[in-house]
Image (spheres, coloured by chain):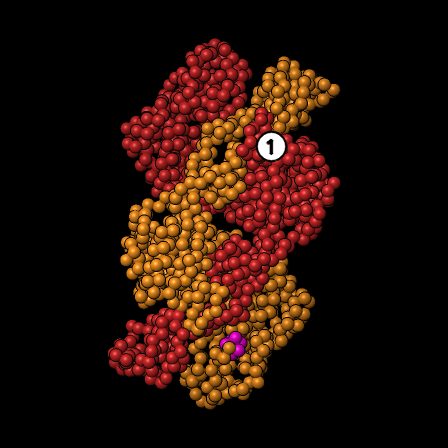
Chain colours: A red, B orange
Amino acid sequence: MSVEEALKTLFEAVKPAPLGVEEVPLLEALGRVLAEDVASPLDIPPFDRAAMDGYAVRAEDVEGADEWNPITLKVVGSVEAGDEANIWVGRGEAVEVATGAAMPMGADSVVKVEYILREGDKVKVLRAVPRGAHVYPTGSDIPLGEVVLHEGTPLGPAEIGVLASLGLPKVRVYKAPDVAVISVGNELVMPGNPLPHGKVYDVNSYSIAGAVARLGCRPKVLGVYPDDPAAIRRVIAEACRNFDVVITSGGTSAGRGDYVYRVLGELGEVLVHGLKIKPGKPTVIAIVNGKPVIGLPGYPLSAMMAFELICRPLLEAYSGLKRKEGRVIEARLASRVIPEKGRVNLIPVCLRVKKEGLLAYPLRVKSGAIEALLLADAFLETSENEQYVERGEVRKLRLLKALEDLPDITGIGSHCMALEIVLGHLRKLGYKTRYIAKGSTAAFTSVRDGVANFGGTHLYDPASKEYNVSFMEIMGVRDKAVLVKGYMREQGFIVRPGNPLEIRSFLDIVEKRARFINRTKGSGTRALIDELLKKVAKEIGDTVDHLEGLIPGFNVEVKTHTAVAAAVKNGRADVGVGIRAAAAIYGLDFVPIGWERYDFLVEKESLELPVVKDFIAYLKSEDFKRLVEERLPGYKVPSDVGAVLS
Amino acid sequence: MSVEEALKTLFEAVKPAPLGVEEVPLLEALGRVLAEDVASPLDIPPFDRAAMDGYAVRAEDVEGADEWNPITLKVVGSVEAGDEANIWVGRGEAVEVATGAAMPMGADSVVKVEYILREGDKVKVLRAVPRGAHVYPTGSDIPLGEVVLHEGTPLGPAEIGVLASLGLPKVRVYKAPDVAVISVGNELVMPGNPLPHGKVYDVNSYSIAGAVARLGCRPKVLGVYPDDPAAIRRVIAEACRNFDVVITSGGTSAGRGDYVYRVLGELGEVLVHGLKIKPGKPTVIAIVNGKPVIGLPGYPLSAMMAFELICRPLLEAYSGLKRKEGRVIEARLASRVIPEKGRVNLIPVCLRVKKEGLLAYPLRVKSGAIEALLLADAFLETSENEQYVERGEVRKLRLLKALEDLPDITGIGSHCMALEIVLGHLRKLGYKTRYIAKGSTAAFTSVRDGVANFGGTHLYDPASKEYNVSFMEIMGVRDKAVLVKGYMREQGFIVRPGNPLEIRSFLDIVEKRARFINRTKGSGTRALIDELLKKVAKEIGDTVDHLEGLIPGFNVEVKTHTAVAAAVKNGRADVGVGIRAAAAIYGLDFVPIGWERYDFLVEKESLELPVVKDFIAYLKSEDFKRLVEERLPGYKVPSDVGAVLS
């Protein structure tokens, strides 16, 4: 079933409508939804109001007045803002008025103070005014009886202020829906408890409760339930008695026994079982005891995206909110997307603010990855039979995060510990940073595609015997980017303390069948590993392919130097290749291979951004050099760091 | 002083930084700001995890397997997600695994269930797999020790979920700043109290408290204080002892005695007195007892805009938020803006979502109008010496409201009570509507400029003796809009019950010097009034100008029929021109002048929008005709309502 059909079926079945009305003090009404049309109980302004400092007069008395023919009036009083103004202005008379003051009776206009000469209890009026000049008539802003705010309006600061202007200390708002949040899965443990082997911490209770609260609803986390029909039945039945809406996650996919679906079929009526979306297919929608139960998929990002599509409109309807679209923005796709056919694909993206508008960078992350939750700012929905979404196409996206929290600088490229120091400095300056460790190659493609402002790279070119420079040409970024000189890093084998397997070279690894922890393809370190392996193959007259097969763990890839060190530290591997600083942090031994240069590819367009200027200025600072060489063994910062190389 | 200089001075003086750290349960951390870098205390996944349902094998055991040469393995167990997986997979063995299960020891890869034939305790493997296939290695999502979230991150649902994935039940966040909110002005009364003549209800305490709360800070409304230095001194001194930041509004302009400025100078140090912005000039910034005190202007919208420029960055800095820009969006200007020179102009706009992006419609509203607060979605800052901002220019704007709450349909034009019924119907269908009553002429200009989807109009052309149609040509909208037929309305004189002044014609009004309440220029009713006056002038051989001068109140303009009726009801005027239905609602008498046609100008581009289709469909419905003729005397709905006239 499509999302539209599913929502239609659900809405027809439960007819979601506000769940009641409550009166709350105005100051507590922020974020609530107005439950009735509010007509103004008074005129605003409630009296004819002086719009300027000056003198209230009868316009007919000053007809023809100018600097050469001033007209003299008798001042019979003065009215400040807030005064009752029970003075009568007769023929030939005037009353001093302040901005915001009520007009004294009899007067119909205000002469600005600039056109008045005061002399004792007389004024000379130097300019005639049309009748009504500088008077803000009663009710001309909001007339008595006018409907000022309509039922269904979410109350922000401005609306709260408008209600205050009407003199209303309280306001009738819709009751916020009570929402039960349940996680299902034998593998789940609530945060704060020990984690037995084979289990993971529950994410969805928290992210879903947060999303529910963001909509102004009241979430209640009921906890984690095992894949046990009896337990699931008990908690859902109970939840459907005490809450307005029940949201579960996990336990809905066929391979997991589909317990939630089965239980819902027993307890009530299943309306939807399976959606034509990817991810999110196992979504279940049911009615139990007249209450809607939404069973979301178990993977955190999938659950969040399905929440946006199904739970948001449902909860908005129960809240009395009228929103057709949710949080939708438009952005240009940074790269082509080839969706799986026959269903709507939900493609998570991260966003970057560019001069020409928002750019959406489709995330290539594993389903179920927590990283995906961290990076996804929004998602794209393809249509059911869309063949591809072209790079550059402008599409509607649903937001998962607040636009105002987008980073000021986005880097994509190789992981580096000295770069962490630079980024930490930028954050201290007040910039929001985002760096995605995807390897050196991604620095070139991402800056080329306009996705990233910069990227770190340490790619060696055996032909030129140089780092990074020749890749400017090879990767086609010469027009779009410059290469900024970075620093030297010492690469080597990261091994357990004392180097028990006595690994001195890659040949040792092959011969000793040492359990290896590899880096992701496209990273500079992986290029180094592949280079070393090629040398060994040549030395011993074997093929690279065969050697790769001989090394246990060669297929296991991680993204950072620290992850390599962590794997060795935790005994998951005997050896990996990485920088000395990573080995040092984990108290591991390090067998040097050589020095490499780590540079920064910087988008030309971004060179003018204050954050990028601050970035390069900091690279060149003494402070940076000192901190790096103090904290990070195996790093050398050259004197011309920050220079443009190419 | 410019806003930038003022902020710099303020930040140098108070050095705003987070005010402390507190540990809160994860579920209560939504919207709070992370007070420390959070490094992962575990690997995610915490074990090598099966990414598919299938069988865990040693890749070397199934080398070369295909459908014609299946390899048979012995099944030695099964692991579900959440199981401890303490099974050893030896040579020639396999273990059944579910998605999410921990890999059993010895196995390095998963063969998907599709490539398996199970036969008792044996499986035939139909496909070879590379080592590591469908295994999600330990720490490959987030390695132990990796900094996952940085200090200063605002915690949304996704971040809360990420922290849960790390097993953290609590999180250290920055203490939310406590902010005192004070309103100053003799004319102010707190909502809920009676309103003496000359006073108005305080708006700013409420809108500012709302804006403070939206930033995650804790506002406390201290109430309304008169323009009395002693009282102001007492409350500000007290507030500076008990709160982190103090925000006042009002009492800062020279004409009002500038009490807040004077008091701040006595209590502490005034850093800024007067900003080069319009509105917002009288803004005062001071330090008292080490605490910043911001004195905002008194007009509600001015206060909100100055809040965005000054208070938002200050409060964000105290909250630990790193935001360079606040809530900034880009939009195209719908009409040219000519700013006042020599200072930054803050131009409030309302926004409309169009196919090509956001369109910003500069609001021409009176300073201090509550209506402005209601309509302003965002504001534009001109630069100090900008001559004009051209129509069509794309500019950065600061948001005052949530983008997701923009209306689905915007109408600008003449006010009409039957139109209220149509809009009410659309809201029942779930659309957000906005209608700005600016008169018939504005319908043409607004639809022409792409600002409005539609507008109501009742403009009479004496030449063609027709309503509205000829204005399609005159106003140059033929290419951009169609005219949709509306209904007939009876216009007449609205007078007190019993018509005590015996007004039968406009001549009566002139002769009897009846106090008139006029409508705004550009409205269809005003056009009718001007037409009637012209006739009278001809009849009695006088000039229109002279007659206008003779009628008291002719210069007092209101925007709606109901406002005219309200003015007569409340005795502010003896007579006005309006529709019969408005007179009826207020229990007033009505002297018919004649019938007019009220039509809808609809933007062609908008005809395809569901909301506009629903609009026209409802116009044509029996339901609409019945409701209008039942509820609104003096309305006739013709059988061809909703037809395209031109």
- For the point 66% across and 44% down, the residue is A239
Image quadrant where residue A596 sits:
top left
- For the point 47% across and 25% down, the residue is A563
Image quadrant where residue A100 sits:
bottom left
- Residue A55 magenta: no
- Whether residue B475 is visible, yes or no, is no
Q: Where is residue B461 shown, x and y percent of the image?
A: 52, 76
Q: Amino acid at mark 1?
A: Leu
Q: Is residue A303 above or below residue B595?
A: above
Near-viewer residue (B139 or A527) = B139
Neighbour tally class for label 1: few under 14, some 14-19, many 20 plus, Cα within 10 Å: many
Tell me which secondary structure the magenta stretch mostly adopts. helix
- For the point 45% across and 64% down, the residue is B190
Disc 1 designates what residue?
Answer: A188
Q: Secondary structure at mark 1?
A: strand
Look at the image and give the residue range highlighted in magenta: B564-569
Q: Where is residue B534 shown, x and y percent of the image?
A: 47, 83
